[in-house]
Amino acid sequence: MRMVGLTGGIASGKSTVSRQLQAQGIPVIDADKVAQAALRKNTWGWRRVVAIFGNGILQENGEVDRAKLGEIVFSDAAKRKQLNRAMEPCIMLGLFYEILKHWILGTSVVVLDVPLLFEAKIDWLTRPIIVVWVDDLTQETRLMARDNSSKEQARNRITSQLPLDVKRARADIVIDNSDSLEQTKVLVNELKKTITAPPSWKELLFSRFGVAAMVIGVITITVTRLQ
Ligand SMILES: CC(C)(COP(=O)(O)OP(=O)(O)OC[C@H]1O[C@@H](n2cnc3c(N)ncnc32)[C@H](O)[C@@H]1O)[C@@H](O)C(=O)NCCC(=O)NCCS
Ligand SMILES: Nc1ncnc2c1ncn2[C@@H]1O[C@H](COP(=O)(O)OP(=O)(O)OP(=O)(O)O)[C@@H](O)[C@H]1O
């Protein structure tokens, strides 16, 4: 199974590209959704986070007040590190589960939309790596407009991640999303052709069928030798 990495900066347009890919029939695993599920009330992640930040981050119904937690961690690097450390195993488990489901189903290409793919050092899992890039001012403007946030809040979030230019330098494929949505759609159409190219030997070997063939091969050789 080919696991394609999709990453970028906050509000650089990962979800926009992800939606366009999904509209073309490509399955996408969204790490933000996995992280949200991992923080729901009474989950393992919720317990770990509440143990660190206390009941003050909870709403009346016991769910985490995401805006409040966001305010805390995006303006304090040490607290953000604590949150990342608490959430990381829960997110990894969730991602692994989603990947496993696709592998069992025999999916040939799945896109992993992971904002912190490089920061969490899991970029080695995916190939090729697509970075959705925008220039700094466009990123800031779109983030402020989308989240209805101040310039300071937007800057805090942007600077809490590896600089987007560094991510661009580490990409296999760059989607420049600074232009219109129509222009991005054109780039995504091209992207689809690249990521759905025929599988390599390595991808075939680690596909559901490749592993099944290896298991059958090993069993056959063992049984033959025992006779
Ligand atoms: C702090 C939280 C509660 C804020 O929630 P909120 O609804 O405001 O934001 P949301 O989850 O939609 O994230 C929006 C974007 O923020 C960025 N972001 C999220 N967490 C982090 C982080 N720890 N460090 C840097 N950027 C982050 C990502 O680009 C993400 O796409 C939430 O982001 C969270 O639980 N973060 C920790 C989990 C995590 O690392 N998620 C990223 C998945 S790889
Ligand atoms: N090419 C574009 N032209 C104009 N607006 C855009 C374009 N691409 C994305 N946007 C807008 O910019 C905002 C951020 O885009 P999007 O939510 O896709 O980013 P993201 O990288 O997924 O963000 P996050 O890191 O928070 O998950 C959204 O409001 C979206 O509608």
Image: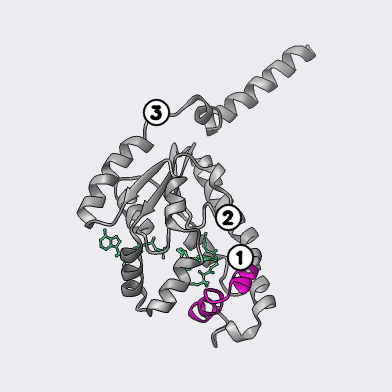
Magenta stretch: give its range.
66-83
Residue pointed to by mark 1: 84
For the residues labelled 1 and 3, the Cα–Cα distance comes to: 36 Å
Q: Marks 3/2: CA distance?
A: 29 Å
Q: Which residue is mark 3?
A: 198
In the depicted structure, whether residue 37 falls above or below residue 106: below
Residue 93, x across and y down, in percent: 61, 55
> Residue 67 colored magenta?
yes
Question: Where residue 178 sits in the image (x, y, percent)?
Answer: 28, 57
* Label 2 C-beta lies within 8 Å of the nearest ligand 1 atom: yes
Instruction: Indicate which disc, 3 or 2, sits on the residue closer to the N terminus.
Output: 2
Whether ligand 1 has any atom under 8 Å from the Cβ at mark 1 is answered as yes
Q: Is residue 46 visible?
A: no
Q: Residue at x 56, y 32 (%)?
A: 206
Q: Residues within 10 Å of mark 3 (few under 14, many from 20)?
A: few
Which residue does the numbered mark 2 point to in the structure image?
120
Image quarter where ligand 2 lies? bottom left
x and y percentages locating residue 95 in the rendered image: 55, 53
